Image (tube, coloured by chain):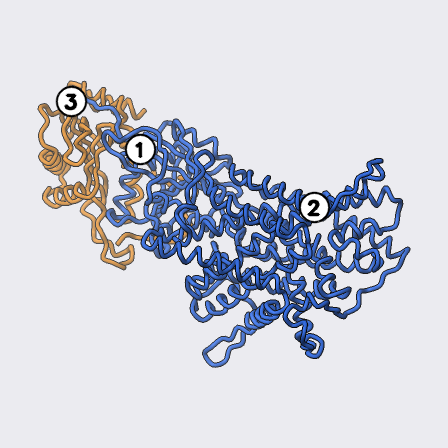
Chain colours: A blue, B orange
Amino acid sequence: MVGKPSRRVAEVVVLSTAMLTFISFWRAAAIVLCDMASTAWYIGGIAEQAIGKGAPWFILGVMAFSACILALETESAAIFVRGGVYKVVREAMGRNLAKVSVSALMFDFTLTGAISSVAAGQYLAGLLNHAFPHLHIGWRLNPDAFSVFFAVAAVLYFWRQNIIGIEESSDKSLKIMRLVAVMGLVVFGWSLVTIWFKGFSLPPFSVSFDPHSLGWLAGTDWPRKIGAVGLLVAFGHAFLGLSGVETLVQVYREMEAPKHGNLKKACLVIFLTCFLLTAGMCFLAVGIIPDAERAKYLDNLIAGLAMHQVGPHWARLGLQAFVVGVGSLILCGAVNTAIVGSNGVLNRMAEDGVMPEWFRYLHPRYGTTHRMINMVALLQIGAVIASRGNLYLLGEAYAFGLIWSLVFNAASITALRFRRLGPREWRLPFNVRIGGTELPVGLGFILAVLLAVACVNLLTKRTATVAGIAFTVGFYALFWAAERFNRGKARGEHREKVNLRNEETVEQVLKHLDKPNRVLVAVRDPHGLHHLAKALETLDEETTELVVLYCRIHYGMSFGGDVESLGPEEEHLFTRVIEVAERSGKTVVPLMVVSNDPFYAIAQSAQAVGAGEVVLGTSGRLSLENQLERLAMTWGAMQKADQGAVTVRVVQKGGAEMVADL
Amino acid sequence: MPATKTTPPAKTGAARSKSVRVSSLLSEDVISIVSPPPEKGALIESMVKLLCGKKGLGDPAPFLAKVFEREKKISTTLDTGLSLPHNPRTERAPGAPAGLDPPSLLTNIFAALTVIPDGMTDPMEKDIPISVMFLFLSPDRGEFFPMHLQFLRSVASLFQPSLIGALAKAPTPAAVLELIRKAEK
């Protein structure tokens, strides 16, 4: 009586998530720059209206200070791979202040969408008004009305994209940034020619506040008598140049290995681009466009710069079209980043039980958190309509959330220096050791500057203060009420969203693998993934694919049938797998099989994918020898004639391992 | 406590020990065909006693104890119908270096084989009928463990359902041995 083999894999599921595709530092920098560099299109005009012709010097100062902020974010990333202001502040200062900082950040996400889309509308209106006479069209657009119309259309477009769940790729960001680089080189080059013929005058290093830009300080002499206060007021009006810096920590988790080295390179690219592009454009605009003419272009300053270069009119109009085209792309990209960013932050809050359950319902067709996306889009449209296309008004309201979330972030990282004493990959420099205590002087300086600017902005940027506080209080109340209501329901930990793709056989998995070598790592315990971390450490990503295998054990009648969802424990396990992969910055292929015997599942899967190495963790139930023996037996039972040799590594928690060739 | 090493493992099986031919370990006097099937424990006991008697290994009691100890840990039965009872590696004192392994009772592998044409129930794997039991005793010192694993793999690889089906129909131990020799060629 010889039975049929009964210990074989019944179902095979490949898990996929966008989070397992790691990107180069160029792509990461491009994603951040699509938000951060877009401010170059509107900061010059807004800052000049607030503080006068000397604005470029303060924009230059803010862009130089961006190096400090990027360093701050780098240290934050060294502490948490999945960071962000909510995580950092919650860790250092507790849930209440974390809710405040996120509420403030939500205000800026809302305004980012509004200001970017309105700016794009202003640029397009300016171009069309220049082009109509050449096309013998007798129209003249009202730039404010047109920009409201365009901005609402842009927000609706990206709202729809997000509802459907179409994610913007890093590829698109890279293409946009290449265009921005080309545009920058053309404008800078052309400007040098213009300067050669027309000359150039540096803007004065002075400020001229109008009463509006002094806010509640308008009745006092402080900004004029106390130079430092005046400088801080001016600095505060240029601070919106840092918008988008928060995206860096969001994108860090997607960065490829060596993760921290790549983060530093990305920071350098971001800093140089913003410094040269944002500050450079402002200096050129003030230096080349005559004062009287410049006043007409404060809502589309780079278009004004294009139209005041030397050369025939048609060529300048062509340059303006190029500038507007590139500007529209990057500014609309920022609208999308704002929707994606706020949806991401709200989702994180929801997972922590800090959002009403109602918001968490997924779209029945597209599976996206449509209610959150609806809310974000509605808020952005509300801000666009409330501004009535007035870019300066939006600029004045802007940066409240940015600066206060940065203050909380800097304070939290400073606090974590004293509370998390373990080694970290990178720390902000300028640390002084006094006795047994290390004082973070560099961090302290950044915190002091941020706090000073934030406090001065509270008094001078009235629109930002009133609207920002109202908005923050509103969101905080929502979070607070939701937290009370959801008490006990919170899942506590982030769960990665993965897509499941059922395959007919394990061999079908091969189509997802394109590197010559394969390593299979078997996982089971979310808290015992040390062997996966070790395998990733030594993985040569150029030549070797790492398959992470989990075996769902089923017996009897429940054995078989498509796998439609993951159980909570499996979700937890794969979330941890993705976290470990993210920490290393190396790609893994997560695979789940259904079987009634884990060792058969490992042997069959490893042989099917052609693994030359199998890595196991230690088991609480079985000794290393028993694990190896059982795998050797099942490997033999499954072995085909052409099967190559395999090396099996059993890795213990301390890192020691037992290695055997089968 | 198992021996551990922290050096990177070899990428291929280049370091594999010379493989042992299963047929070279068997002779007609250690092959039996049983019908009706006995209980698994009783069959193991009789095979260990047979092996010790025929190969001059002395008192079967220590071997029996070790094979039963191993059987309690994790199944040695495969879904092909092959059962592979064996003695485990002797565990070293925690932290003791490899050179301090207790002395082994054996210096080579000794094996016996029983064909069970009607199939026998394994108490640990009730849904898999055992048709062939290949019992072996091997040196239990740490340095022999890699060869022990490769031997397990090669025996499991040899006894595929087609061979097991043929063995179940074999009339005599000589026929059984001949089938194994053919399969190994």
Residue drawn 12% across and 42% down? B64
In the rendered image of this protein, does residue A284 appear above or below residue A578?
Answer: below
Observer-nearest residue: A218 or A640?
A218
Q: Which quarter of the figure is the N terminus of chain A placed in?
A: top left
Q: Which residue is mark 1?
A: A636
In the rendered image of this protein, does residue A251 appear above or below residue A163?
Answer: below
B4 displayed left or right of B123: right
Amino acid residing under circle 1: Gly
Chain at numbered mark 1: A
> Are the residues flagged by discs 2 and 1 in contact, CB closer than 8 Å?
no
Residue drawn 55% across and 63% down? A406
Q: Which residue is mark 3?
A: B117
Asked if badge 2 and badge 1 are on a common chain, one would say: yes
* Marking on residue A145: 2
Q: Is residue A273 something that shows in the picture?
A: no
Observer-nearest residue: A50 or B52?
A50
Estimate how packed mark 3 is, as few (under 14), some (14 to 19) or many (20 or more) residues with alpha carbons within 10 Å.
many
CA gap between label 3 and label 2 equals: 90 Å
CA gap between label 1 and label 3 equals: 22 Å
Please report whichever mark, 2 or 1, sits nearer to the chain's N-terminal start. Answer: 2
Amino acid residing under circle 3: Pro
Estimate how packed mark 2 is, as few (under 14), some (14 to 19) or many (20 or more) residues with alpha carbons within 10 Å.
some
Q: Quadrant of residue A214?
A: bottom right
State the image coordinates of residue A571 (x, y, percent, origin top left): 37, 44
Observer-nearest residue: A1 or A469?
A469
